[in-house]
Amino acid sequence: MENAHLRFGLLEYVRMTEKASTRIRLRVDRYIGEDRQTHLLSVFGNDSDVGAITAAVHEKAAFSLTFPDGTTKGRVARRTCLLLQRGCDSTGPGNILCAICWRCPRNSTPMGARDGLSCLRYRREEAWATLVSFLGLPADPTWADYILGIVEGKKRIEEIDGIGCQPVLISAATEEVA
């Protein structure tokens, strides 16, 4: 993987108090978001930086995000609820790679925000399986083309911002596809 570092984004957290200032930068492997709302974020770095970002996430702090192409999105934040995973991998003596990933579940959408299902990429088979599972619909795989045709026809599939993927937001209610 030559030049793999060129596909990563950069997450930056800055906190200033009377006595100290903190600036933490971590590499972003995956990101899905729209506007300033983060649906999924996966970062990695050393143990202390990942721990500090984990604490900042729990405090509902905002971050600055730089995409691989150099564009910056300031003040990205997570939605109200959070599924947080943290892991470590020892890659050799003295080298520990830590990662944090957060994901916002559908039913955590605050009032006024758009509700929907975000996917890493749009492939009809995967979108169909995820959509029926997500909406709790009894469905036969032979119905996929018809139902997804309705969703696509109503322009309910929209590309959103991403790093390491080509995410889409599928906004469909049970009543529309049932």
Image (cartoon, grey):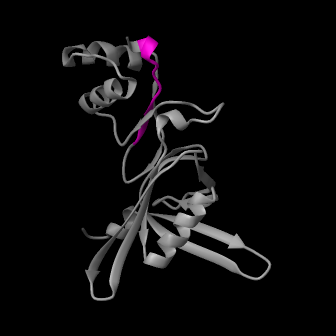
Answer yes or no: is residue 64 visible.
Answer: no
Front-lying residue, 52 or 127: 52
Residue at the extreme left: 142
Write the residue at 38% across / 62% down: 7
**Which quadrant of the rendered structure holds the N terminus?**
bottom left
Image: 83 above or below 155 = below
x and y percentages locating residue 17 in the rendered image: 76, 75
Residue 40 placement (x, y as % from top left): 45, 49
**Residue at (34%, 40%) from the top-left corner?**
121
Q: Is residue 100 something one can see in this rendering?
A: yes
Q: Say whether residue 93 is magenta.
A: no
Residue shown at 61% from the left, 60% from the top: 63
Left or right? Give the position of 32 relative to 36: left
> In the image shown, does 86 or 128 lie closer to the viewer?
86
Tell me: 42 left or right of 81. Answer: left
Q: Which residues are magenta?
A: 167-176
Q: Picture quarter containing residue 3?
A: bottom left
Query: In this image, 86 relative to 141: left or right?
Result: right
Q: 86 and 122: which one is in front?
A: 86
Residue 109, placed above or below residue 61:
above
Specify whether residue 168 is painted magenta.
yes
Picture quadrant of residue 152? top left
Quarter of the image with the C terminus in it: top left
Where in the figure is residue 128, as x and y percent of width and height?
29, 26
Count of marks, rendered view: 0
Estimate the x, y position of residue 60 in percent, counting from the top left: 63, 55
Displayed quadrant of residue 136: top left
In the image: residue 75, left or right of residue 146: right
Asked whether 176 or 145 is in front, the reply is: 176
